[in-house]
Image (cartoon, helix red, strand yellow):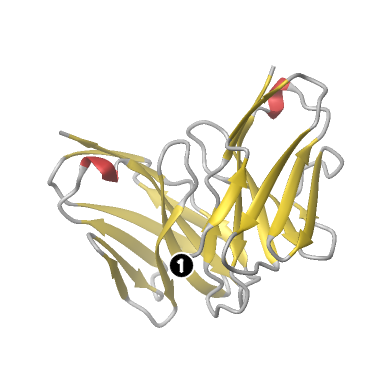
Amino acid sequence: KNQVEQSPQSLIILEGKNCTLQCNYTVSPFSNLRWYKQDTGRGPVSLTIMTFSENTKSNGRYTATLDADTKQSSLHITASQLSDSASYICVVSAGGGSQGNLIFGKGTKLSVKP
Amino acid sequence: GAVVSQHPSRVICKSGTSVKIECRSLDFQATTMFWYRQFPKKSLMLMATSNEGSKATYEQGVEKDKFLINHASLTLSTLTVTSAHPEDSSFYICSAIRSGANTGELFFGEGSRLTVL
């Protein structure tokens, strides 16, 4: 069964600190893995998309890694800001092309405190 | 960057009425759009896949007669909640895949909050 599991479920950190969110998946065949940020009451916004051959991709203070062998991905946030408080969702695409089946993780809720 | 617009962002209606939510891709064509429902503090739940020019594909447990989806053009999909009940109150989000992109980049709308009284 295709699944995407994220950890931790929630996380509280102090402003300026770094943190790492985890995403483990059992999806086959694998197409790509995406990280989204969702502010409360808003739609998700794309942070990164990685295909099988990509190990690391950065978007500002966000750096995503992908280990296709162990089927694990992480999202590292550097020098956190209050505006980073949001839910972070890992989405894995199964199958080929743009019509691939999308498997959503339940998200990690990050709270950055002053 | 690509933008997906939803309208309305908030809607309040009475039980028994129908509500239509629009999802538009503003600067790209989208042959496929997705509709999701999200309860408070929960993850997105895929309701249906909307394909331009054909019938939508509904996920198991989603009533197709309750949630009518029409994808009439490459830039517009609509979700109509028919005979709304208070339990239909939720946050509805659409997304669209940019046609032709190798990785099928997915863009989400801002969401529409439905409250049924």
Residue extending furthest toward the bottom = A53
Could you say whether the residue bearing mark 1 is in a helix, strand or loop? strand
Residue at image mark 1:
A33
Which of A77 and B94 lies nearest the eye of the viewer?
Answer: B94
Q: Is residue B82 above or below residue B36?
A: above
Amino acid bearing label 1? Leu
- The residue drawn where x is 56% and y is 72% is B104
- The residue drawn where x is 74% and y is 45% is B79
- The residue drawn where x is 52% and y is 59% is B3
**Quarter of the image where the C terminus of chain A is located:** top left
Query: Which quadrant of the figure has residue B20?
Result: top right
Which of A114 and B100 lies nearest the eye of the viewer?
Answer: B100
Residue extending furthest toward the top = B117
Q: Is residue B33 above or below residue B68?
A: below
Residue B24 rendering spot, x and y as whole percentages: 64, 55
- The residue drawn where x is 78% and y is 19% is B15
